[in-house]
Image (tube, rainbow, N blue to C red):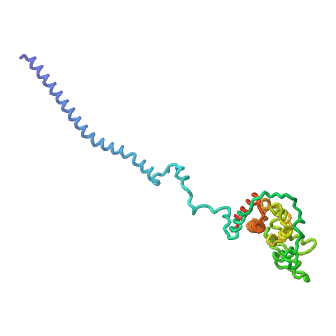
Amino acid sequence: MSSHGFAGLRRARSRGAVALLYAIAAVVVLALLAVIAVPVAAAMGGAIGAAPAPAVSQTSSPAASATPAAPRPTETTATPPSPTAAAPPTTPPPASTPDAQAARAALERLETVDGRSITRYYREAFGQAWYDQDRNGCDTRNDILRRDLTQTVIKEGTGGCKVLSGVLEDVYTGTTVNFVSGKDTSVLVQIDHVVPLSWAWRHGAESWSEDDLRAFANDPLNLLASVGSVNQSKSDSGPGEWMPPSAAAHCFYAQRYIAVLAKWRLGVEPADRSALETALETCR
């Protein structure tokens, strides 16, 4: 073999050795990268997987976040209020006293009528004003004054009948009135027909006998001493049109009104029935 042949062989062997070394180095580098990549990937994977954890704790725990989420309406409005926290009622409860319960039951039994009469009302049909119905020697007006007034002074020689003066604690207004009998002063205290005569006439009284009409006009249950101006303002109005000026008197007035209607079997129209029911709700 010539010198040129040996030289070419040595160069070929040298290039082959270098290529082998490069291949070996590449394998080593790949192996090292594979070894290093496993813990790095695990570390990175752990960090990535742990990231959502704080968000879960924020939504699952009401105290975990400094910025609370917006309230959901269904959680606040759908919960009924506690009975103990409710505000006290602004209106009185339904009548619960024994007298009010009896009055309510009596009112329910009363006949409903339209409040119209066939014949015209006139005062004379009820007989003499303040007739001595109980035959005690005193007219009915003075009987009621003695019953309803305090500190009364009775005129001598009248058999204990005539009231000269006294003090009225007026139920309808809650005021105190000093009564003095006289031409210009007696009118300050009048006797009210709780159920007005004209009203009674339109609700059944027109068919009564003369005796019953007179007895009704002088029945102490249907009479009450009151302030004259208040009695005049009431006139012949029913409960649907008139109630005592003092709201504190509404319960008493309704009970008395119903008691008279029940005793005399008078009817009541819807508007008056409703007003009486409302007044009974003020009873305590």
Does residue 49 show up? yes
Q: Quadrant of the N terminus?
A: top left
Q: Is residue 18 left or right of residue 264?
A: left
Does residue 191 show up? no
Rendered position, 266 above or below 39: below
Identify the residue shown where x is 86% and y is 78%: 135
Rendered position, 136 above or below 57: below
Q: Quadrant of residue 199?
A: bottom right
Who is closer to the viewer here, 95 or 214?
214
Q: Residue furthest left?
A: 1
The picture places residue 216, in percent across and down from the top left corner, at 83, 69
The picture places residue 129, in percent across and down from the top left corner, at 89, 70
The picture places residue 148, in percent across and down from the top left corner, at 81, 75
The picture places residue 84, in percent across and down from the top left corner, at 57, 63
Who is closer to the viewer here, 167 or 97?
97
Rendered position, 2 above or below 110: above
